[in-house]
């Protein structure tokens, strides 16, 4: 019986080996390509759910950033430098290169990459990227240490303060933000506000629940002024030691330290408290505010329309951009794509059938392509070089 079971015909053995080899090849091929998107799913979404031309998926077509090119030859701030600043380390270098080259193609010349480690800094410098050092202590990417992310955020704040004190106005941007068009940054100076913010979604959750909105630390414009520096001093004061979460810290300062007086042309958000006679300012989160309606619970109810105000503590002036201009949502593409007046997209949590499966870095790079196809109706315009 043992002999009979062991006597397998050569043709049978060859067939089994061939089948095993084919299975291994399929698994290997799938592993190499599993980050690619489902083309059919994309095509169906684009045909049926993209907002109509001239409209916005968030419900408001922004008028922010519509000033064209600005002539500042007569301005007192004509000699003030403006920098676009993105931060990267070796892990995010592939995304940072895509972000940098996209800004090149849009016509920007004032963007820099701040490097968190010596290896990244030397690579960028030797390959002719504009770069500045923003080093953290003992970066161990093979063995991430506790608090590494907070250490990076703290370093960003310190470099931001140093540049502001040196006279540079700064557009701070995460390197996975996708710029849609060229907007002359001098127009932000002409608008006259000290600090411009974008809406975030709901993080930090505790602050969102209390105030109804939060601002985004990953996309903001800071004018170099004494008032802005006072604001950053408050931020750094809450950034205890050398480790902090900048998203939490900015919002803690924004809502708890600034005592903002909000402005509105119809004055519907300003009232006198009948009990104590003190002035109250309700800000953008009021009963009649325009909000997103979505089946996605992370997006549903988020504010859409921007707002302006002034801090009674630092005296710095504030503008929050319309969400159509600085777009930040979870998924909801192409249904909630902004209008063509949009400046930047900050998409996140895109479904796997759209973004593809695979490594986080690859998926983030793929978002640049998704944004162009879904929201800008452009294909093949940019170079997306996957690592």
Image (tube, rainbow, N blue to C red):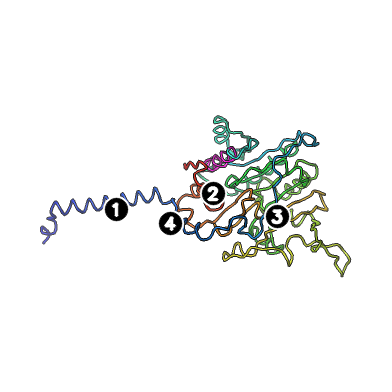
Q: Outermost residue toward the front?
A: 53
35 left or right of 253 in image: left
Instruction: Estimate the spatial distance between the alpha carbons at disc 3 and disc 2, rounded to whole Å.
Output: 31 Å
Instruction: Estimate the spatial distance between the alpha carbons at disc 3 and disc 4, rounded to whole Å.
Output: 41 Å
Q: Outermost residue toward the right?
A: 277
Residue identifier under label 3: 251
User: Crowdedness of circle 4 by 10 Å Cα count: few (<14), some, many (20+)?
Assistant: few
Residue identifier under label 2: 372
User: Crowdedness of circle 2 by 10 Å Cα count: few (<14), some, many (20+)?
Assistant: some
Question: What's drawn in magenta, residue-wise?
Answer: 89-104
Q: Earlier in the sequence, mark 1 or mark 4?
A: 1
Instruction: Estimate the spatial distance between the alpha carbons at disc 2 and disc 4, rounded to whole Å.
Output: 17 Å
Q: Earlier in the sequence, mark 2 or mark 1?
A: 1
In percent of width and height, residue 245 lies at 65, 51
Q: Nearer the viewer, residue 244 or 121?
A: 121
What kind of element bears circle 1?
Answer: helix
């Amino acid at each position: 019986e043992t002999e009979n079971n062991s006597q397998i015909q050569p043709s049978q053995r060859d067939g089994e080996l061939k089948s095993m080899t084919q299975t291994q090849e399929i698994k290997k091929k799938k592993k190499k390509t599993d980050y690619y998107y489902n083309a059919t799913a994309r095509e169906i979404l684009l045909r049926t759910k993209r907002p109509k031309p001239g409209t916005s998926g968030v419900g408001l077509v922004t008028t922010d950033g519509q000033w064209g090119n600005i002539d500042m030859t007569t301005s007192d701030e004509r000699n003030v430098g403006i920098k676009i600043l993105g931060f990267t380390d070796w892990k995010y270098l592939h995304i940072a290169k895509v972000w940098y080259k996209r800004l090149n193609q849009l016509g920007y010349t004032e963007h820099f990459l701040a490097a968190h480690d010596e290896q990244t800094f030397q690579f960028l410098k030797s390959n002719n990227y504009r770069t500045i050092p923003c080093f953290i202590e003992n970066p161990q990417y093979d063995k991430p240490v506790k608090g590494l992310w907070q250490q990076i955020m703290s370093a960003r704040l310190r470099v931001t303060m140093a540049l502001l004190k040196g006279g540079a106005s700064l557009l701070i941007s995460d390197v996975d933000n996708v710029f849609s068009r060229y907007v002359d940054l001098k127009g932000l100076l002409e608008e006259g506000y000290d600090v411009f913010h974008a809406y975030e979604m709901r993080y930090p959750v505790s602050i969102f629940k209390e105030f109804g909105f939060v601002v985004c630390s990953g996309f903001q414009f800071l004018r170099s002024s004494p008032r802005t520096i006072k604001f950053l001093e408050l931020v750094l004061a809450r950034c205890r030691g050398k480790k902090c979460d900048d998203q939490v810290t900015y919002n803690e300062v924004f809502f708890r330290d600034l005592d903002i007086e909000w402005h509105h042309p119809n004055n519907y958000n300003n009232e006198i408290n009948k009990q104590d006679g003190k002035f109250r300012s309700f800000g953008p989160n009021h009963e009649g505010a325009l909000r997103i309606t979505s089946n996605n619970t992370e997006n549903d109810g988020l504010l859409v329309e921007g707002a302006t105000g002034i801090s009674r503590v630092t005296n710095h002036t504030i503008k929050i951009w319309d969400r159509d201009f600085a777009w930040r949502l979870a998924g909801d593409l192409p249904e909630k794509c902004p209008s063509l007046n949009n400046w930047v997209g900050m998409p996140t949590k895109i479904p796997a059938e759209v973004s593809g499966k695979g490594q986080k870095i690859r998926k983030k790079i793929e978002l640049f392509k998704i944004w162009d196809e879904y929201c800008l109706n452009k294909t093949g315009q940019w170079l997306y070089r996957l690592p």
